[in-house]
Image (cartoon, rainbow, N blue to C red):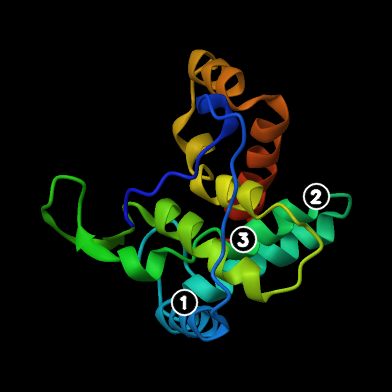
């Protein structure tokens, strides 16, 4: 769960198919759990709002931009929903920290996005793309050099990278 990676075609797949269960009760249960666990303060220097409020603000920011792919807008709404599961007061080395950290939240959020998308009627029928955007939404924060950016563009493609930058802009401007 914490290490989930949404597959991408560039990994060598010819096709990626998502096969859903028809158990509506499972989906409703999963969404209720997501809402409950994300109505909490983030308790770190990068975000001042509760997780759910931040996600709604990112969604609004993207929707207000206009002319943005609906998949990006929906990914903005869901991009940090894995944080409620991953919140811990330990740094990357396992030392106790006064600030909350969310290691793996992008992986948990990418996986859980498949449950939300199954219930919510959205104008983007590409749940795989939304999950990919969520899974990789932290890359612009860690890709600082020209070499690393070129590597990401080569791997994901320029269109996907530009979509990540739009999502990142909304994330940064909605803290």
The CA distance from mark 2 to mark 1 is 24 Å
Picture quadrant of residue 87: bottom left
Q: Is residue 11 above or below residue 50?
A: above
Question: Residue at image x 57%, y 16%?
Answer: 150
What residue does disc 2 label? 69
As drawn, which residue projects farthest toward the right?
67
Please identify the quadrant where the C terminus is shown. bottom right
The reply to whether the C-beta atoms of the residues labelled 2 and 3 are less than 8 Å apart is: no
The CA distance from mark 2 to mark 3 is 19 Å
What residue does disc 3 label? 174
The CA distance from mark 3 to mark 1 is 20 Å
Q: Nearer the viewer, residue 46 or 16?
A: 16
Q: Which mark lies nearer to you, 2 or 3?
A: 2
Question: Few, some or many C-alpha atoms within 10 Å of disc 2 (few <14, some 14-19, many ≥20)?
Answer: few
Of marks 2 and 1, which one's residue comes earlier in the chain? 1
Q: Position of residue 127 (x, y in %)?
A: 65, 55
Considering the numbered disc 3 on the image, is that residue within a helix, a strand or a loop?
Answer: loop
């Amino acid at each position: 769960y914490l290490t989930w990676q949404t597959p991408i075609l560039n990994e060598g797949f010819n096709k990626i198919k998502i096969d859903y269960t028809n158990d509506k009760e499972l989906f409703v249960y999963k969404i209720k759990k997501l809402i409950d666990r994300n109505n909490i303060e983030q308790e770190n220097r990068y975000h001042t709002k509760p997780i759910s409020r931040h996600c709604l603000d990112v969604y609004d920011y993207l929707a207000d931009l206009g002319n943005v792919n609906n998949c990006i807008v929906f990914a903005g709404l869901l991009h940090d929903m894995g944080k409620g599961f991953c919140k811990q007061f330990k740094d990357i080395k396992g030392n106790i920290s006064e600030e909350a950290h969310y290691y793996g939240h992008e992986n948990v959020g990418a996986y859980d996005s498949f449950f939300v998308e199954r219930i919510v009627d959205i104008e983007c029928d590409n749940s795989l793309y939304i999950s990919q955007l969520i899974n990789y939404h932290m890359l612009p924060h860690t890709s600082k050099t020209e070499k690393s950016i070129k590597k990401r563009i080569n791997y994901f493609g320029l269109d996907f990278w530009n979509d990540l930058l739009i999502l990142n802009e909304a994330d940064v401007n909605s803290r």
